[in-house]
Structures are given as C-alpha cells and as structure tokens.
Image (cartoon, grey):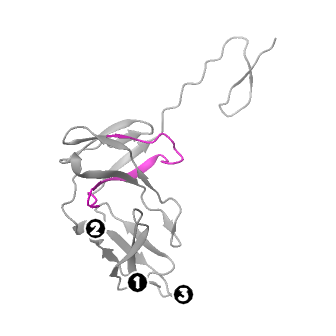
Amino acid sequence: ASTEAEIYDPATNTWTTGARARVARLYHSIALLLPDARVLTAGSNPSRRNDEMRLEIYHPPYLFRGPRPCIEHVPERITLGASFTVHVPDAGEIKWISLIRPMATTHSYDSDQRLVDIPFRRNGACRLNAHMPANPNLVPPGYYMLFVVSKRGVPSVARWVHVLAKPKAPEPALERGDIVVGTGRRIVRVDPG
C-alpha cells in the first residue's frame, strides 16, 4: 500500500505526492475530510484480528499557500433551487464555493461522496450571491460542509448547511363527480363521460 498522500489537480490533470503517512491504511480504513480542511486517516486491518487503532491527521500543503478565506455568514438552511448570500471579508479573492457531503464510508469506499461547485457572482466587496442547484440527484437533501476557496486554492473552514428539498406543490382538490384511480397519494382523474 502507498503511504504517500496524492493530490489531484483537475486544471492540469496531474497528480502530486504529499507527505508520507506513518501507518499503512488498508482494508477497513478511512480518510475523513474535517471541517477545517485537514484529513483524518484511521483504521486498517492488515491481517485478521490485527486492527490498527492509531489516527493520523494530514495537513494538505494547499492550506499554507496564503491566508485562509473566512465565511462570516451563510444561511444554515438552503432549499434546492434557491438563491442565497455568503458573506466573506474579501469577495474578490474567492474562486469557488463548494459543498462537500459528509463521509459515509464502509469497507474503504464512500458511496455517498460528492463535491458540488455552487455557481455564484460577486456582489460588492463582501458578498457572494450563490444559487443552489435544483436537481436533488446532484445535491440530495441533507447536511453538507460549505467551503469557499481562494484564488490561490486555499479553503476556508467549512460551515455546516442543511440542504432542503423543494416544497411539494399542493395536490389538486377532488371535486364532486371525480373518479379516482390509484393508490399511494397519486390521483388520476378519469372522465366518466
């Protein structure tokens, strides 16, 4: 097993190696992104009944490329398809707003992993007007870490946000003479004439 951290840069389609871990992480291990953008690694069982109990915290080198952006305010709840404002001290320095789903790892695999870039535009010196995607397949409702990332690639400390589903449209009321077919809250009107 490789003990070196690997960092992918999508802009250049390249990988670079980072610091070397002291503990090999094999089956039943995790790498957990923390809200402060460090990474916790834990677990492993190189052989049956030989469980690794040591934890390590990795400080990615991009944390040291310059000052970290700061999120002064973001709504705690954001509905799919809605616009919202992120208050930051220096909006001109922000390159990305990203949502990252918390980890749900089992057997070294996170089936719920996702990073969603949120489109935004700057509004003055301290505001980012953002728009949450409307598609629940892209952003399933639930809790996310919201990061802002500087033009130097330095992430903020995350703020937790709760992404909510869009309110459902009210179902049409039944009228006298309607014939209803179906079950499970699905109404199908049939014209008796």
| Residue range corresponding to the magenta coloring | 129-156
Mark 1 = which residue?
3
Mark 2 = which residue?
62
Q: Which mark is residue 51?
A: none
User: What whole-number distance in Å separates the C-alpha atoms at marks 3 and 2?
Assistant: 37 Å
User: Under tag 2, what secondary structure?
Assistant: helix
Which dot, 2 or 1, sits closer to the camera? Answer: 2
Up the image or down, 110 lies above or below 164; here it is below
2 or 1: tag closer to the N-terminus: 1
3 or 2: tag closer to the N-terminus: 3
Mark 3 = which residue?
48
Q: Residue furthest front?
A: 12
Q: Which residue is drawn at 33% across and 38% down?
A: 84
User: What whole-number distance in Å separates the C-alpha atoms at marks 3 and 1?
Assistant: 21 Å
Instruction: Indicate the position of residue 66 as horizontal and vertical percent values.
Output: 19, 64
Instruction: Indicate the position of residue 54 as horizontal and vertical percent values.
Output: 36, 81
Up the image or down, 131 lies above or below 20; here it is above
User: Under tag 1, what secondary structure?
Assistant: loop
Which dot, 3 or 2, sits closer to the camera? Answer: 2
User: What whole-number distance in Å separates the C-alpha atoms at marks 2 and 1?
Assistant: 19 Å
Going by the image, does 24 lie left or right of 148?
A: right
Q: Residue at x 43, y 52 (%)?
A: 116
Name the kind of residue labelled 1 in the image.
Thr
CB atoms at circles 3 and 2 under 8 Å apart? Answer: no
Going by the image, does 123 lie left or right of 54?
A: left
Name the kind of residue labelled 2 in the image.
Tyr
Question: Does the magenta run of residues contain 96?
Answer: no
Q: In the rendered picture of this protein, how many numbered marks are placed on residues? A: 3
**Toward the viewer: 61 or 25?**
61
Q: Which residue is drawn at 67% across and 30% down?
A: 186
3 or 1: tag closer to the N-terminus: 1
Up the image or down, 130 lies above or below 180; here it is below
